[in-house]
Amino acid sequence: MRPVDRGDVPKNYDDNVFKPKTYQEFREFLIKRLGSYCSYCERPISHNVAVEHIKPKDSNKSLEKEWSNLLLACTNCNSTKGKTKVILAAYIWPDLDNSALAFNYSSSGRVNINPSISQVNRYRALKTIKLLGLDKEPSYDPVMSGDTKDQRWRERRTVWEVAIRALERLRRNDTNDFREQIVDTALGRGYFSIWMSVFVNDNDMLNKFVKAFVGTANDCYDCDYNLIFRRTGRL
């Protein structure tokens, strides 16, 4: 899960704090700050970009237009999370924690918990996966159980395959132009963490991905783009 930094509360052209009439007015600011990607599953969102309330607005009216309570979400993450009441400390959040430390990605398309984090954080990571349905897998057989409308798992697996092919081609044709082309492909395909996982041994590419995906929290990485602990002290 890509760690993100949405920045300070937006301001108007007259340099006054932006005070929207509705929370939807924050959408363009969030897209500009974070890119058009789901803040949770990382899929690219070409339409129906939902302004996500970390703490549901129905049970937290005072937070409906609170900048620090807003992210972007795809239809699947938004609907799965729904109106679930959340205690922030009980979950992993991309804007509060170094969320990339909590999860591992692989060719299977599954989102797994990083076994090297503490037991408390493993429990928080598990609750996060369940909250967002990141463990859902579409069934090949419509008669069997499985949400065929939820394609996130299949998309992750496909992007992993694309990233692996890009890595293999880079080994045969290592030029800066081709590296930039890979970044363009990654931006179009989304799933930041998959690209970071596949190119884990190439610091130059990790640097390019972190800089290219707008809103990525730079302070989650050291000078060699290795993940580091930071922020709240929880993770």
Image: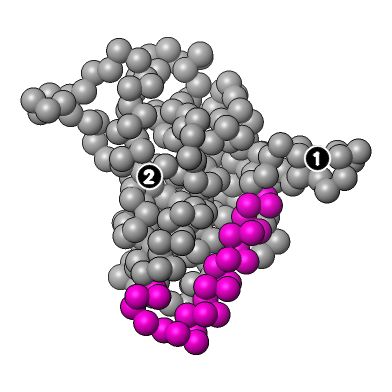
Question: Is 218 inside the magenta-drawn segment?
Answer: no
Instruction: Give the SS element for disc 2.
Output: loop
Instruction: Give the SS element for disc 1.
Output: loop
- Of residues 202 and 116, the one nearer the viewer is 202
Disc 2 to disc 1, C-alpha distance: 30 Å
Q: Residues within 10 Å of mark 1 (few under 14, many from 20)?
A: some
Of all residues, the one furthest to the right in this rendering is: 143
Residue 161, placed above or below residue 124 = below
For label 1, the residue is: 146
Q: Is residue 187 left or right of residue 126?
A: left
Query: Taking the image as drawn, is residue 228 in sight?
Result: no
For label 2, the residue is: 35
Q: Is residue 12 left or right of residue 166?
A: left
Magenta-highlighted residues: 153-179
Query: Taking the image as drawn, is residue 136 in sight?
Result: yes
Q: Is residue 39 left or right of residue 5?
A: right
Query: What amino acid type is highlighted by mark number 2?
Result: Gly
In which quarter of the view is residue 130 placed?
top right
Residue 17, placed above or below residue 102 = above
Residue pictured at 67% horizontal, 50% vertical? 153
In which quarter of the view is residue 211 placed?
bottom left
Across and down, in percent, residue 175 comes to 37, 82
Residue pictured at 36% horizontal, 69% vertical? 180
Query: What amino acid type is highlighted by mark number 1?
Result: Gly
Question: Is 163 inside the magenta-drawn segment?
Answer: yes
Mark positioned earlier in the residue sequence (2 or 1):
2
Residue pictured at 63% horizontal, 52% vertical? 155
Across and down, in percent, residue 66 comes to 34, 23
Residue pictured at 69% horizontal, 40% vertical? 150
- Of residues 54 and 202, the one nearer the viewer is 202
Across and down, in percent, residue 81 comes to 60, 30
